[in-house]
Image (tube, rainbow, N blue to C red):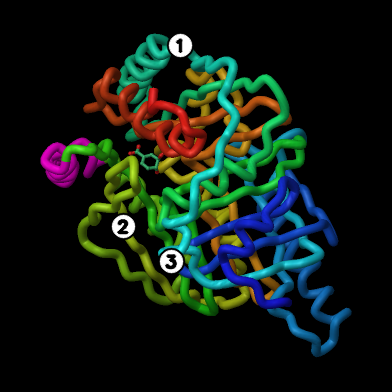
Amino acid sequence: MTEKSPVDLLAAYRRGDFFLATENRTMLGRGIHTAVSDADEFALAERVRTLLLGKIEERSGEDEADLVAVGALPFDSDATTPGHLVVPKDVHVAGALHPAAATLPRHEVPRPVAIRPVPEPSRHVEAVATAVTALAERNLRKVVLARALDVEFAGPVGPEGILHNLVVDNDRGYTFAAELPNARTLVGASPELLLSRRGRTVVSHPHAGSAPRSADPTIDRENAERLLASRKDHIEHAVLTEAIVETLRPYCARLDIPPRPALVSTPTMWHLGTTITGELSDPGVTALHLAAALHPTPAICGTPTPSARRLVTELEEFDRGYYAGAVGWVDAQGDGEWAVSIRCAELAEQSLRLYAGGGIVPESDPKAELAETSAKFATLLRAMGLPQE
Ligand SMILES: C=C(O[C@@H]1C=C(C(=O)O)C=C[C@H]1O)C(=O)O
C-alpha cells in the first residue's frame, strides 16, 4: 500500500472506484480483483468471508491490511438488485479528510436540463396521509416513506464532481461513492452508521427524528430545541433504537445504550441519534453479517418490518434500488464499517435519481413530512450547485 494523503485519494477518485470518507479515515478501492453478488445478504457475508480468508492463505505472511471487500446492499435484495461487493485490486487508506477538505475549491457540476419529482409532491402528501391511516388499521408503529427527484443532464456526467463537493460540505458522517451492478454509481453523504466492528467492539449510531437547519442562528437553535422536545420524534426514535438493541443483543456479551438520544447535526439537518456500543460474545461474526442482520432498520423501513415493507411497496411509486440500503467495507478479520445509504443518488450516464424519506408515526403531519424530505434533498442538491428546492 503506497502512502497517499487523504486529499490525494479524493483527487484520484474516478467513476468505477469505491470511495468512503469517515471522520477519521479515507478509503479508495480501485479495480476488481473479485466481484461477489448475492440476493441473500447472509449468503453474501459468508461468501465474502470465505473469499477473504482464502486470500490470506494465498498471500501467506504478506501484509493483510489491504484485504477488504467494499460495496453496497440494496433496500430490497432480489436477482436484479443484489448485494454487491468487490475485492479491489488496490486499496489505499489514509487519515481524515477534514479539516483540510473544507478549504478545497468546489467543483463545477453541469446544470441539469430537467428535474422531475417522483411522485408529484401532492401525491407524496396523500401517500403519507394514507400511511397514517394504515398504521392504525394494520397495527404498525412506524413506516418510512420516501420520494425521489429524477435529474437529467444534456450530456454525460460523472460522479467525481458531486463526490468532491459532498466531501467539502460534510466534515462528519460517511461520504461515499460505490459502483452498483446496474452500471450506476451510488454517491452520497450519510450521517448514519448502521454498524461498525473493530475486534470485539461493535457500534451502531441510529438516527430518527429530524428538523431542518436554518441559516438564521436563532431559528436554527429553535428548530433543534423543538426537535429535542418533540414527543412524536422521540417515539420515532425509540422504535428504532429498540429494534437495533433487539437485533444486536443475541450477538453481544455487553451492550451500552444511552437512556436518551442526543442532537446530531449535518450541514442541512438536525437529527436525534443514539450511539449504541456492544462487545461481541463471538468475535467470528463479521461486520457484514451484523449489517445484514440489522437491515432494514426502522430508520428506513418501519416496525414491524414485514408489514412496513409491504406498505412501502404499496405506497411508493418507484424502486428504491440501493437507496436505504447500506454502503461500506469488511476486511479479512471481519472488521468493517457500514453506513445507511441515505442522502444519496444513483447516477447513470447522463441522469440521476436522488432519494429522501422520513419516518411516519400516527402523530405525523403529511405536509411537514413533505417539507422534511425536501430538506433532506438539500445535501445532494447543494453538492450539485442547485438551489435547495
Ligand atoms: C430515510 C431517511 O432518513 C432517515 C429518517 C429519519 C427520520 O425519519 O427522521 C432520520 C434519519 C434517517 O435515519 C433519508 O434521509 O432518506
Tell me whether circle 3 and circle 2 mark residues in contact (CB < 8 Å).
no
Residue type marked 2? Thr
Residue 346: x percent and y percent?
A: 62, 34
Residue type marked 3? Val
The magenta span reads 217-235
Mark toward the start of the polypeptide (1 vs 3) = 1
Residue linked to disc 1:
120
Mark toward the start of the polypeptide (1 vs 2) = 1
Residue 354: x percent and y percent?
A: 53, 30
Residue type marked 1? Glu
User: Which residue is at a point 47% across and 75% down the rendered structure image?
Assistant: 201
Cα distance in 3D space between marks 3 and 2: 10 Å
- Asked if residue 304 shows in the view, the reply is no
User: Which residue is at a point 31% across and 21% down the rendered structure image?
Assistant: 132
Structural crowding at the residue carrying mark 2, measured as other residues with C-alpha within 10 Å and reported as few (<14), some (14–19) or many (≥20): many
Residue 383: x percent and y percent?
A: 48, 39
Residue linked to disc 2:
274
Tell me whether circle 1 and circle 2 mark residues in contact (CB < 8 Å).
no
Cα distance in 3D space between marks 1 and 3: 38 Å
User: Which residue is at a point 36% across and 19% down the rendered structure image?
Assistant: 128
- Asked if residue 81 shows in the view, the reply is yes
Structural crowding at the residue carrying mark 1, measured as other residues with C-alpha within 10 Å and reported as few (<14), some (14–19) or many (≥20): few
Residue linked to disc 3:
203
Compared to residue 301, the image places residue 260 above or below, namely below
